[in-house]
Image (spheres, helix red, strand yellow):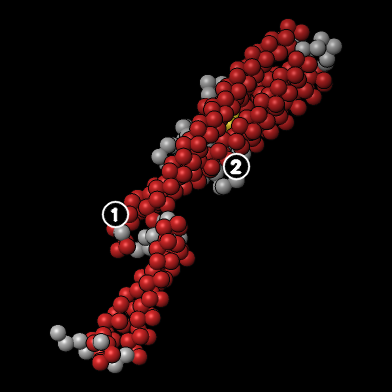
């Protein structure tokens, strides 16, 4: 068998380059913390990491939709709270109107105050969500959903709700028609009560009937507003449950991705040390070959 100096040199160079490449790969893994940087590194693990990343992305999108729903429902719940307080003030004004010592002027003044609260309710019904929509916009509206036409308030939005397009739909709006109009329009109730209180020369029994009818209708409207507020609260509670589930999904996806592509630092350090030792040995061999003649190599 013939062994030439050139063959020995090439063999040593090949070994040195191979060990240098392995050492560089180990160093890259330690630096990046990734065992799989390309699909070719481990196709099965890369596919597993890709599936986990897709699940993580879907969960992140659902989280954004859930946060939008939470913001809207928190604002809607607050708006309905404000509406409930306004209706309570109307109720107190109606009770006050039953005072037998009040004359036309006092009752007319109470009617004016009820009209002011009615306008406040209309502003609440048209309250925006801060993102270009309306809290009571139903299935969608390109303008404030409630319009006052000659004292008659109507809803331009479609009945129903707009929901987040996600794995679990969550509401972005409340049904404005059901909330404010329903079988008994909140605005008509207040308009009628104010108009009757501002009608002069009414008898005591007529005033008492106005107060009784007004309280009955106001209580019905307040009950509907409270029910809608409870629905908003239920949506917020359900949002907490969905948020917890999405957090679990995100954590699981992150863990799966890490297991698939992240490097085991203890093992990586051990491999790096072993490859560094091998590379040093190859360098030493290369230096020896450079100093050797063919006769010395064969000996």
Residue at 46% x, 39% y: name it: 248
- Gap in angstroms between the C-alphas marked 2 and 1: 50 Å
What crowding class fits label 2: few (fewer than 14 Cα within 10 Å), some (14-19), or many (20 or more)? many
Above or below: residue 20 compared with residue 125 = below
- Given residues 253 and 298, the one toward you in this image is 298
> From this viewpoint, which residue is outermost toward the left?
1
Q: Find numbered disc 1 in the image and state the secondary structure of the residue it sits on.
A: helix
Identify the image quadrant of the N terminus: bottom left
Q: Is residue 248 left or right of residue 43?
A: right
> From this viewpoint, which residue is outermost toward the front?
299
Q: Is residue 204 left or right of residue 299?
A: right
Identify the image quadrant of the C terminus: bottom left
Q: Quadrant of residue 220?
A: top right
Residue at 43% x, 47% y: name it: 255
Name the residue that disc number 1 marks.
44
Is residue 137 at least partly visible in the picture? no
**Upstream in the sequence, badge 2 or badge 1?**
1
Q: Position of residue 7 (x, y in %)?
A: 23, 86
Above or below: residue 170 compared with residue 111 = below
Q: Quadrant of residue 193?
A: top right
Residue at 38% x, 76% y: name it: 281
Label 1 near label 2: C-beta < 8 Å? no
Is residue 89 at least partly visible in the picture? yes
Name the residue that disc number 2 marks.
128
What crowding class fits label 1: few (fewer than 14 Cα within 10 Å), some (14-19), or many (20 or more)? few
- Given residues 62 and 230, the one toward you in this image is 62
Q: How many marks?
A: 2
Q: Position of residue 164 (x, y in %)?
A: 46, 41
């Amino acid at each position: 068998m013939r062994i030439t100096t050139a063959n020995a040199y090439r063999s040593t160079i090949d070994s040195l380059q191979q060990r240098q490449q392995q050492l560089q790969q180990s160093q890259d893994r330690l630096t990046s913390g990734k065992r799989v940087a390309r699909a070719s590194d481990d196709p099965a693990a890369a596919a597993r990491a890709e599936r986990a990343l897709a699940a993580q992305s879907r969960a992140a999108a659902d989280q954004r939709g859930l946060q939008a729903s939470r913001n809207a429902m928190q604002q809607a719940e607050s708006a309905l709270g404000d509406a409930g307080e306004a209706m309570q003030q109307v109720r107190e004004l109606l009770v006050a109107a039953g005072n037998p010592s009040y004359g036309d002027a006092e009752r007319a003044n109470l009617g004016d105050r009820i009209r002011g609260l009615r306008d406040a309710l209309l502003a609440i019904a048209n309250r925006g969500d801060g993102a270009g929509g309306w809290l009571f916009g139903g299935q969608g509206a390109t303008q404030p959903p409630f319009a006052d036409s000659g004292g008659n308030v109507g809803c331009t939005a479609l009945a129903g709700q707009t929901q987040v397009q996600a794995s679990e739909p969550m509401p972005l709006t409340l049904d404005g028609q059901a909330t404010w109009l329903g079988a008994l329009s909140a605005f008509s109730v207040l308009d009628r009560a104010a108009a009757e209180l501002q009608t002069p020369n009414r008898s005591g029994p007529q005033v008492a009937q106005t107060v009784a009818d007004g309280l009955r209708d106001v209580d019905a409207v307040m009950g509907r507003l409270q029910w809608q507020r409870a629905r908003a609260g239920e949506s917020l509670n359900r949002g907490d449950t969905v948020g917890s589930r999405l957090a679990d999904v995100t954590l699981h996806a992150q863990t799966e991705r890490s297991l698939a592509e992240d490097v085991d630092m203890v093992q990586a350090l051990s491999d790096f040390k072993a490859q560094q030792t091998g590379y040093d040995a190859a360098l030493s061999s290369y230096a020896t070959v450079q100093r050797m003649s063919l006769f010395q190599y064969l000996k």
